Amino acid sequence: MAPLAAAIPFLVANAATISAVATVAGAAVTAAGTIAASRSQAEAAEAAALGEQQAADFEANQLTAAGQREALQLRRNKQLALSTLQTRGAASGFAPDPTLAGDIEEFGTFQEQLALHGGISQAEARRFSGRTASGAASRRAGAIRAGIVPGAVGTILGGVGTAGARFAKLRTPRARTQ
């Protein structure tokens, strides 16, 4: 109990200094918390950007594959039409009209290419939208990271200013009234 009793006059005599130090320490702790929270926000934004880009790539690959499947189905249809033309011509005893066979070949090939192009263009559009969303998330992460240090410095300077004002009030001698 004796050491505590001896410490009380010291604490009372230095209350202004202790208050100022505590205010600055509190500001430093707040700044450290701000930095940690900002870093985790930036990391979350970067993870979201990566996830969006990966999802866009996956969907784009699916769209390309769908276009390829459609083109293969159209090729089968074209070959079936040409085979049917030849079979019917042979069954009737006449040779199939080469103009008609050429038209079927040309139109079928056009449909195949159109299906491939459709799948590829949809895939590219999805990749572009993924890059756009990913870029926005990356910019958000960069803005968060850019604000970390100024925010922490502002918190610390605010704490120092508050501590200085408290310390000055307690140290300034008051005018005595008589």
Image (cartoon, rainbow, N blue to C red):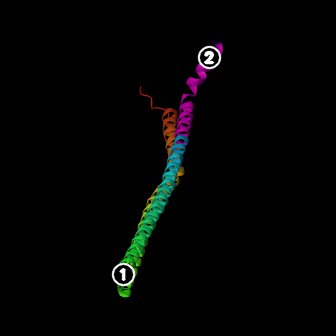
- Residue pictured at 39% horizontal, 71% vertical: 77
What's the amino acid at mark 1?
A: Gly
Is residue 7 placed above or below 129 in the rendered structure?
above
Q: Locate residue 150, reporting x and y percent.
A: 52, 51
Whether residue 176 is visible, yes or no, is yes
Say the numbered circle drawn on residue 73.
none
Q: Nearer the viewer, mark 1 or mark 2?
A: 1
| Mark 2 Cα-neighbour bin, 10 Å: few <14, some 14–19, many ≥20 | few
Q: Reply yes or no: does residue 30 show up in magenta.
A: yes
Bounds of the magenta span? 2-31
Q: Quarter holding the N terminus?
A: top right
User: Which quarter of the image is occupied by the C terminus?
Assistant: top left
Residue 161 magenta: no
Q: Nearer the viewer, residue 47 or 21?
A: 47
- The number of numbered discs placed on residues in the rendered structure image is 2
Foreground of the two, 136 or 166: 136
Q: Is residue 167 above or below residue 62?
A: above
Q: Quadrant of residue 83?
A: bottom left
Q: Quadrant of residue 120?
A: bottom left
Q: Which residue is mark 1?
A: 89
Q: Is residue 114 visible?
A: no
Amino acid at dot 2: Leu
| Distance from Cα at disc 1 to Cα at disc 2 | 115 Å
Numbered disc 1: secondary structure: helix
Residue under numbered circle 2: 4
Q: Secondary structure at mark 2?
A: helix
* Residue 139 x %, y %: 48, 58
Badge 1: how crowded within 10 Å, few (<14), some, or many (20+)? some
Depicted 154 relative to depicted 73: above or below: above
Which callout, 1 or 2, points at the residue further toward the start of the chain? 2
| Residue for point 36% across, 87% down | 99
| Magenta-colored segment: predominant secondary structure | helix
